[in-house]
Structures are given as structure tokens and as C-alpha cells.
Amino acid sequence: MKRSTTYAADGKYPPEVQQMMAETTRCLNCGKILSLLQRKDGRRNRGYCTLECYFAKPPKLAYAEKEYGAAAKEVILKMLNDGASVVATAERLGISKPRFYDWMRKMNIKKKVVWG
Ligand SMILES: [Zn+2]
């Protein structure tokens, strides 16, 4: 039986994320203006200028930024502070747990236990 909710592996995303990728004229990671010529075959322009940018900020994270109107770090902090687990947050953003931990390290997000 196949799960229909796994998007990341085969490049399928929820409709709202697909729409964002199709409509953006700038790279969703670095903001570089995407060449219109790349869109000729209807496939090249998937919202990013390079594959590096795609991995640096996957579509779901870009969408979460848009949705929250905040930078990636703030979005992640908000999700975690709202009580979501690291695993749940990573899943929601469509990234693997190791990559998410990597981001947390890069963004200098540390788990902090607050007593009382
Ligand atoms: Zn880029």
C-alpha cells in the first residue's frame, strides 16, 4: 500500500506549494530573478535557480516562510515553541531529521529547558 502523503521523495508537493513554485519569478532561496527562457519546456523553472538553492530551502520551508510572513529561523522557532517536536516540525517542512538538525545548528537554534 502506498502512502499518498509523502511528497518530498518524488517531487510532488501540495497544490498550494506547487502553485507557489510555478508562479514565483525569483528563486525561492536566494531571490535571484529566474530566467523566463528556462520556462519554455514548462519544467526547468521549479522555483529555484539551482539545485543547491532547492536543497538550501526546500519548497515546504519557502512556503512556511510565506505563510508565516517570517524568516525560516523564526518560523522554525515558532513551530518548536508552539510545542511541536523536532520530528514533527521537520516533517511539516518536508525535510529529513538529520538535515533539520543541521539547520538548527546553522541557525544556532538550541534546545533549552526552562525550569519553572
Ligand atoms: Zn537561488
Image: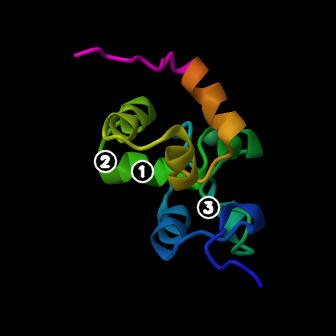
Q: CA distance from mark 1 to mark 2?
A: 6 Å
Q: Quadrant of the C terminus?
A: top left
Disc 1, disc 2: CB below 8 Å?
Answer: yes
Q: Quadrant of the N terminus?
A: bottom right
Q: Earlier in the sequence, mark 3 or mark 2?
A: 3
Q: Give the foreground label among 1 and 3.
A: 1
Magenta residues, as a range? 106-116
Residue annotated with mark 2: 68
Up the image or down, 6 lies above or below 66; here it is: below
Question: Is 112 within the magenta?
Answer: yes
Residue 19 image offset from top left, x and y in percent: 49, 71
Q: Is residue 112 left or right of residue 7?
A: left
Q: CA distance from mark 1 to mark 3?
A: 25 Å
Displayed-image quarter of ligand 1: top right
| Picture colour scheme | rainbow
Farthest residue to the bottom: give it.
1
Magenta: main secondary structure: loop
Disc on res. 41: none
Residue annotated with mark 1: 64
Q: Amino acid at mark 3?
A: Leu
Q: Amino acid at mark 1?
A: Ala
Q: For mark 3, give the secondary structure.
A: helix
Q: Does residue 109 appear in the picture of this structure?
A: yes
Q: Is residue 65 left or right of residue 108?
A: left
Q: Amino acid at mark 2?
A: Tyr
Determine crowd level at label 3: few under 14, some 14-19, many 20+ residues with C-alpha closer than 10 A.
Answer: few
Residue annotated with mark 3: 36
Q: For mark 1, give the secondary structure.
A: helix
Q: For mark 2, give the secondary structure.
A: helix
